[in-house]
Image (spheres, rainbow, N blue to C red):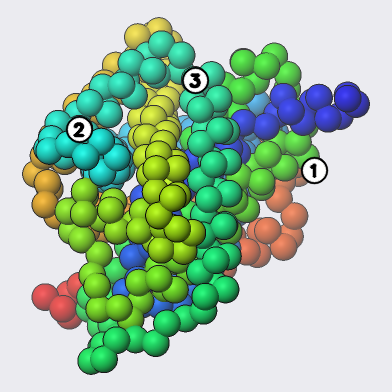
Amino acid sequence: MTESVKNLLKTLGPGIVFAGMCIGVSHLVQSTRAGADYGFVLLPAVLAAVIFKYPFFEFSSRYTSATGKSILYGYDNLGRWILWLYGIVNVLTMFIVTAAIAFVAAGLMSTILQVEIGADALAALILLVCVIILAGGKYSALDGLLKVVSTVLLISTLVAAFVAFNKGVKPPVEGFIPNEVMSVVGITFLIALMGWMPTAVDMSAWTGLWAEERVKQTKYIPTLKETLLDFNIGYAITGVLAVVFLSLGALVMYGTGIELSNNSTGFASQLISLYTTSIGEWSYLIIAVAAFSTMFSTSITVLDGYGRAMNKVFVIITGQEKKWNYTFWVVVVALGAYLVLSQYLNNLKSLVDLATTISFVIAPLAAILNYKVIFSSEVNKDLQPPLWLKNLARAGIVFLSVFTLIYFYVLIVGL
């Protein structure tokens, strides 16, 4: 094995963790809903979100590689109030986001076990196990788990989609009325879909935090090229799977007149049926375990990301690093998520849409901050993004801002 390959293997990790986080609710739930409810109509919106958000996630990994620090330090350099604002936004979103993810994971767990236990109890169990794993193994446990789970789900999903494409598009049932995108409901869902596609922009800081941890784990400082390759692999996986999940929903459920359940357990059963309808009933257990493992790993990733981010904010503001602070924030996020989840036990769609919509509304601010930081004097000009990426970032800011304004307009007019 050559030295370059060894170094690349030491670098790989943060991108896979990022992909594991993205594949959760945004793909399993939102992409599937988009296909099932609207067919392939929303495919351009999914692709646009993935493309226009790309620069802002890349900037975080690039900043960490160029400076050796998280982009949160860049926020602080722009003004301490910005870092405070980032922390406040985290507090406002982290409970809702984590609750939505744990809710879906609980539904899949209930489907596998075939037990009549409330979604709130199963979600509490999932969150508790996640806290124990992170408090004990932290990044190493997260990194190893996600590499295995992501591979299983990736292969299963690609096979299911391939079989579904071969079968072709089924004619809609008699009396089927397609949903209108250009309506209050349609545009509201469109914004929610793009809010976490492939994930929320404000979570971009996490890629740098994971890259920092990977360096501590391997004792190897990767080059900018190696760091970006790791990130790009993870990002490409999320983009491909977003299209695949939407396709599964469109090919298997669109036009059938069957609506996706608003109950987490019911939705989980429908999700698994997308695979079994294409591949065969023999695949039920494999798909169910892979899907649950994905949502479980996403739960761990999100808890880790919020815990790591809030800990870093605390360290930068106070100048003190407490060993217990990371675990403290992980526990706080888990408890808060459970309290939120307990209020949405039979309203999965509303909980997910609330989380994703909030993420989209604050996306323009997060995008602008990442843009300003990466082109600041802290980053050597030779390490700053190329012109094409700079222009794509500008277009991305316009894209996110325009759709946020459209959302508020539709919301006001709709009300």
Q: Nearer the viewer, residue 116 or 183?
A: 116
| Disc on the earlier residue, 1 or 3 | 3
The kind of residue tagged 2 is: Leu
Q: Secondary structure at mark 1?
A: helix
Label 1 belongs to which residue?
Answer: 382
In the visual, does 39 lie left or right of 344? Answer: right
| Disc on the earlier residue, 3 or 2 | 2
Q: Residue 332: percent from the left, percent from the top?
A: 24, 24
Q: Is residue 250 above or below residue 369?
A: below
Quadrant that contains the N terminus: top right
Q: Nearer the viewer, residue 387 or 145?
A: 145
Q: Nearer the viewer, residue 276 or 52?
A: 276
| Disc on the earlier residue, 2 or 1 | 2
In the visual, does 24 lie left or right of 107? Answer: right
Q: Is residue 61 above or below residue 333?
A: below
Label 2 belongs to which residue?
Answer: 122
